[in-house]
Image (cartoon, rainbow, N blue to C red):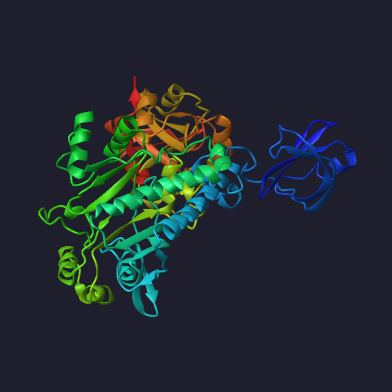
Amino acid sequence: MRAFGKLNFLILRDRSGFAQVVIEDRSEFQKIAQLQPGTVLTISGEASINTQAGLGVEVIHPKITVDVPITDVPPVDYYKPEIQSDLEFILDNRALSLRNREIQAVFKIQAGIAHAYRLFMYDQVQAVEYFAPNIIGASSEGGAEFFNVDYFGYTATLAQSSQLYKQIMVGVNERVFALMPFFRAENSHTPRHLTEGKQLEFEMGFFDHWHEILDIQENCLKFIVKYLHENYAPEINTLHGNIILAPENIPFPRLTFAEAQELYFQRTGIDERHEPDLSPAAERELCRYAAEEFGTDLLFVIDWKTIKRPFYAFPKENQPDLTNTFDLLCNGTEITSGGQRRHTYASMVEGIKSKGLDPANFPDYLSIFQFGMPPHGGFGMGLERLTMTLLKLKNIRETSLFPSDPKRIAGTRLKAKLFYGSENIRNEIIRLMKQGDIDFKHMVHEPTPTSEDSARIRGTSLIEGVKAIILRGKTTKKNYQMNVPSNLKLDMKAVAELVGEKCEFESPELIQERFGLAVGGVPPFGNLLNIDTFFDEKILENDRAAFNCGMQTESMIMKTSDLVKIVQPKLGHFTKE
């Protein structure tokens, strides 16, 4: 609501977008003057052409009925064009933050990606959709990264993929696809991993050359991007036009794994030619090559080493240390893995044993090869990672409605060890010290607004002081705590390289609002504030560490080694004289 006295404007949201209502009647305005965003209204009035309004019209002379009055202020400003908060705060308020127009656009586009995938598979590939189980008796791909569940006294697992089942279905319908959940027990906190997501699966039988799988993969991605431009232009515009380049007339470049490693070395001088995998830096550089040389953001890397592929990957006939497999890179990130599968009984048993697995655990799966399977292969794409990559987002959690990761289940924090306010934080620090049987000195003193004041009052050297600084990422709006010796300054360029984005100092007002702390009193315990915490390595050069413990009038002195042990920060070098 925008109130200007005699002329007031009300902005309404429904599934069609935003509509503007012009209110001149004071009695009508009084019905809503004290209400908050989220209030549900019924409005009748006169439609008037206004090319500046979102729908090309606005409503004048309205009659307002308040259906659901809301008087509480929302905890998150979802009604603004962009929520000026970090991702963790947005996820903590996920149920409301989803109403934000930018976040809403992401998930409308994600629905479009899934629909376009189905259209492509049904209409152009003539594949049959299948629906595989999610609770299975053994790990679907081997390894230890799976969740166990109690199944009536038996141990079952949650499926890592429907790989085994889509191969079974190839023997039934030849070309099959699915949109299935996956569960991976990876204790990974990277911006591109989730423990639960959706997988776009495809498998086909019979081909003259296994590269036909790559052709379908390429055409599928081009179809999806074209479909989004044709049907989701408003949402793409809401996201400032951020979407990858995949022109229909430009083939995705195809490099062997060895060629990709050599190209990375030639372009950067960094030698990873003896590594079994591509580093994230190499993936980014290869995509830059594709964009610069070909005008597309996508590139295939084929012929991967056998040691890096699952047991069902088809080994190359004359080079068994390599496989007929591929990864598809997009805008610096791997979004697809796929290739040809083993298709004879003897070969599949060999593959299972080569990964240290027991063929006896796969009786139904092996039976299909025992009784005949065609040469076949396929691919899988994570829906959330695909959405993140196509829209050039920074974190996969932005593309999951209610993300699960090592810190959250369905968006809800597992252990919300979040403390607010100077006294609560001070008390928790003392509790942790006593619990860990750590020696420390707690001092109460006059306010110490500067590092020099603190050193003088504590009787410590300036270099022993630990200065805690809260930053905000310019892209993600995420908070970081950088801790440095009091005699040194932050090197913001080094900080950007460390966290992957440029940062700025968080405002004192927001630090007070979000954490209940005043600048100068912030302790080097970002873990209690649930923000990423970094210690500069020079802190470790001193035996003692001294710091304010939540307020400018209280300090602690302790062994540096004990401080590092209890905070468990990430270490780096990001200071200068």
Q: Measured from the top left, where is residue 259 in percent x and y? A: 19, 39
- In this view of the protein, can residue 184 be seen by the observer? no
Residue found farthest to the left: 318
Q: Quadrant of the N terminus?
A: top right
Q: Nearer the viewer, residue 328 or 508?
A: 328
Q: Measured from the top left, where is residue 297 in percent x and y? A: 36, 38
Q: Measured from the top left, where is residue 438 in percent x and y? A: 35, 46
- In this view of the protein, can residue 45 be seen by the observer? yes
* Residue at (66% x, 50% y) in the render: 15
Q: Is residue 486 left or right of residue 213?
A: right
Is residue 540 positioned above or below 193 on the image?
above
Q: Nearer the viewer, residue 500 or 346?
A: 346
* Residue at (23% x, 61% y) in the render: 341
Q: Is residue 109 left or right of residue 249?
A: right
User: Would you identify the image quadrant in which residue 451 lies?
Assistant: top left
Q: Is residue 394 left or right of residue 46?
A: left
Residue found farthest to the bottom: 152
* Residue at (33% x, 72% y) in the render: 172
Q: Quadrant of the C terminus?
A: top left
Q: Measured from the top left, where is residue 335 in percent x and y? A: 35, 48
Residue found farthest to the top: 577
Q: How many marks?
A: 0
